[in-house]
Amino acid sequence: MFHIGVDDTDSKSGMCTTYIAAVLIKELSKFSEVSARLIRLNPNIEWKTRGNASICLVMEAKNEEKIKGIVLQKVKELSVLENENTNPGVVFYRGEIPKEFNDFYYKCLHEIVTIREAEELARKYDAEVHKFKSGRGIIGALAAVGSDLKDHTYEIIAYRRKENWGKERNVDRASVYQMDAKTFPLTFNNVDYAEDRILITPHSPCPVFFGIRGEHPEILKQAYEMVRSEEKADVVAIYETNQGTDAHLEHVRKISDIRAYSSVILDGTVTREPGIITGGHVIFRLNNGGGSVDCAAYEPTRDFRWIASKLRVGDVVRVYGGVRADKLTVNLEKIEILKLAKLWEEKNPLCKKCGKRMESAGKDQGFRCRKCKTRLKGKIKEEIKRNLREKIYQVPPGAMRHLGKPLVRF
Ligand SMILES: [Zn+2]
């Protein structure tokens, strides 16, 4: 098979690498059937403020020279080359995917990788690399080529006609709610119900009209037909993707094993109670085997912060999230409460005869029942009712990472 990887063609102000993929699928389908993967890579890399999506197209290995010409022409024509942060890369590879390409994909999910590493690996296996400007995109392009999707989902994306780019997207909201009601959980993250907001339309001026995520292509085609709008889409494409799979998360045993820019699943005990800091972020400290790390539920995670704020010292939890450059903070995506600590408070005793809460009879005088005058000596300890359950909680869909696995998929 012939593999085509493309990455880093867009900018905050426009374009989308998946749009170039959709245009290419249309153009290249005259040679053979084309399948497309949409691959998200390490979400903690700071210079990528948008989705960090790269694509891989797979088709029959014939007419390669013609195909390469079309791909390079379209990437050159459609990329936002004038933006200094847009540095496209294209990788062509024919044949079976080497294990090292697959390892490289995983490395790109969890670490920071250099352009040089990508170039060296491509050279070793005779993959053809094309760099535009610095060509940083060859990293994601090669990772997409090397990707294997053990767990995967699909996304159907409709793109807008060029004259509509940058204009407001008018999708009939009620039709999205109905589509969600009919297709959930086979589609997911269509609506944020707590915020009463539809999530299928992006807010950037890019060519994407709307996208629906789900478990298989057929349900996505049906869901797509249910969404109503006056605007007609230009092209529509379906991608197999690592979105919604938690592919970025790695189990880490000890806090000292945490690497900067990685994404971890880590067990520990709460050692400092949650506090709210400026900006409305909730932070608590987690300890495990001698090390400790702060865990943050940032303001955009909305109600999820109140879950984090109810934790108390001694609670045993499993946290899921991205690690910042300083390795001192985990940006929470999910919390699993493994064991709630038993908490006690001292209270006045209850009357043995009538069950009423007794009142103080004065300093060092014990307690007295107001009704029947029974007396008792000491205070009693009562367990505090915890307003949390031993289960997994996650950030609302509007705050989820592209790679984040919705609880409904667990
Ligand atoms: Zn009484």
Image (tube, rainbow, N blue to C red):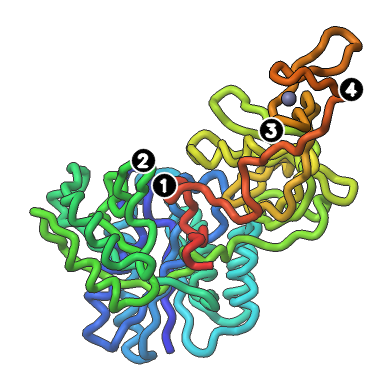
* Residue hosting label 4: 377
* Residue hosting label 2: 195
Frontmost of labels 4 and 3 is 4
* Residue hosting label 1: 398
In the rendered structure, which amino acid carries the disc numbered 2?
Answer: Glu
Circle 1 — which element? Answer: helix
* Residue hosting label 3: 274
How packed is label 3: few (under 14 Cα within 10 Å), some, or many (20 or more)? many
In the rendered structure, which amino acid carries the disc numbered 3?
Answer: Pro
Circle 3 — which element? Answer: strand
Between residues 327 and 373, which one lies in front from this camera angle?
373
Q: How far apart are marks 2 and 1 (CA)?
A: 9 Å
**Rendered position, 98 above or below 182:** below
Frontmost of labels 1 and 4 is 4
Quadrant of ligand 1: it is top right
Circle 2 — which element? Answer: loop
Frontmost of labels 1 and 3 is 3
Circle 4 — which element? Answer: loop
Q: Can residue 153 be seen in this view?
A: yes
In the rendered structure, which amino acid carries the disc numbered 4?
Answer: Lys
Q: Residue at x 27, y 70 (%)?
A: 237
In the rendered structure, which amino acid carries the disc numbered 1?
Answer: Gly
Frontmost of labels 2 and 4 is 4
First reached walking from the N terminus: tag 2 or tag 1: 2
